[in-house]
Amino acid sequence: MMTDSNEYDVIILGAGPAGLSVASELSKDLKVLLFDKKDSIDMTTKSWLIPDMAITIGGAEDILPYMKNGVERFLANTYQGIDVQWQAHLKYHFAKEHELLAYWGKGIEENGSDIMLNCWYQDSFITDKGVVVSTSKGDFKSKLLIDASGGHSPIRSRYALTEDWYWWSVCGAVVEFPDGLPEGMEVGDYQLWQTFRDTNINLDESLSHGRPVWEYEVLDENSAFVFVFYLGKNRIPHEDMEKVFQHVLHDEESTSDFHNTVVSEFKHGWYPSGGPHSQQVTGDRVLFVGTAGCWTSPCGWGVSFIVANYKNYAEHVIEAIRQNALSKKELNKIVHLSTRAKYQVLLDQISTHFLSFASASQLNEFIKLFDPNGPLGEMGPLMCEKLFTLTISEKEAIHLLSHVVKGIGAKELAKNIPKEDYLLLIDLLKDGVEVSVLDALEHGLDYFRKHHKHVIHDESGFAITKPPGMKLIEATS
């Protein structure tokens, strides 16, 4: 129910998990307007896996009723013969995403703030006294504007903000098993990595040039979330991903367990991964959260980052409004979110770029590191989970990177990550690694000295492009 006044403390564009969660906290102390073009507060095309530690770090135990089951076993298989599995070391939750969004929305309204749906952003103007936001339902004023509108943010475009982001592009569905789970499949299984011979023209193609990875999460005794993902500097168009997804779901020989499943809900989304400064995005009286602010963790676990930060973030926003500390310089002080140490962000950045550019055979060597019977032994699986939940220690990060350098080779690494990443990698490894590893890395620099630049796609972080070599397969059902 809208209030009579069109003036608010905060206006938030976007009713996804970032906008709703932050608004639910701000509305406890401030008058908030949240608006979105969607027609239902619980609407989302995404599915979320949330590590339990994110909930604990964020003090967000109130959302636990909107979680169910979680990962019990990780698996990885490739067409080249890699077959890895291990029992999960850390605790994870599958989110009941529609119920969680509705919970946050209900809290906003119970706190006396407003939600407007079927409402489009048109423009915004910053003045000395506040912000004027023009929408399809009228003009509204506030002290602060928070952009939570996602990767196609019109406000980012207005500020000409571009990022050298990499994108996890995801397309899939929640499916039901008519006769229950197939033999050998268990509730809590997470197929973390699976590739196929026939989804690319070049069998050794990288993810950045269009090799899809298949994954699935077994949610309960009758359903699973199944999907393909791509990783690179481009967002893959939904229609292109869907063709490949349908092929893998219905026709791929090694996914026969899913051929007779019934789709209950289609899913898709794009998740950014950035570098150390990617979350420090503000303007006078303007903040960016969620995908618009590159709030993400590896593998598209963006909601994990939101859950770990939204309550603490809201406290700082409330204080900034009370102090009228709303200039770009002052707002920058509150966006240094504490859940990611510098070396963790750096390792996230290097890992994402390597996963994007490495060939299929090189990625096999990387996956072997997480095999309990591999070079890292029983520590391998735990390293994997810590790497992708941003909880790996600096000592563990250096140990893992040392094995990557030894197993893949410095020159191969140099070919498959941008030069600036490679130099940062050497800097990270300088403390606590054996001289032979650093010597190998220094020799890898010869590659850069002989090749003046690392060739990558030059589109902006917001481009949607079909990478060369991507094989689009017409679905048959």
Image (cartoon, grey):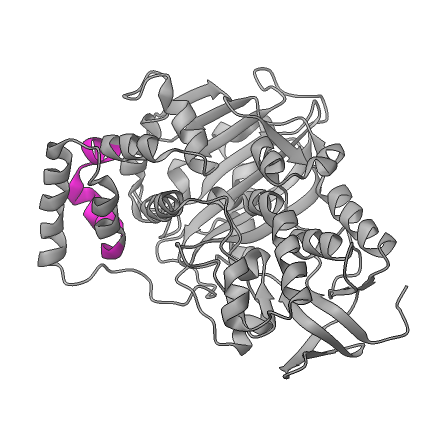
Q: Residue 471: within the magenta? A: no
Which segment did they paint magenta?
404-420
**Most frequent secondary structure within the magenta stretch:** helix
Where is residue 170 drawn, in percent x and y? 53, 48
Q: Nearer the viewer, residue 461 or 10?
A: 10
Where is residue 188 drawn, in percent x and y? 60, 24
Q: Quadrant of the N terminus?
A: bottom right
Q: Quadrant of residue 94?
A: top right
Where is residue 263 drawn, in percent x and y? 69, 39
| Residue positioned most to the front | 323
From what the image shows, is residue 327 above or below residue 104? below
The residue shown at (30%, 31%) is: 400
Where is residue 120 drawn, in percent x and y? 72, 72
From what the image shows, is residue 279 above or below residue 342? below
Question: Is residue 148 shown to the viewer in this render?
Answer: no
Q: Residue 408: within the magenta? A: yes
Judged left or right of residue 57, residue 281 is left
The residue shown at (65%, 54%) is: 314
The residue shown at (58%, 37%) is: 57
Judged left or right of residue 33, residue 281 is left
Q: Quadrant of the C terminus?
A: top right
Q: Nearer the viewer, residue 340 or 264?
A: 340
The residue shown at (52%, 46%) is: 300
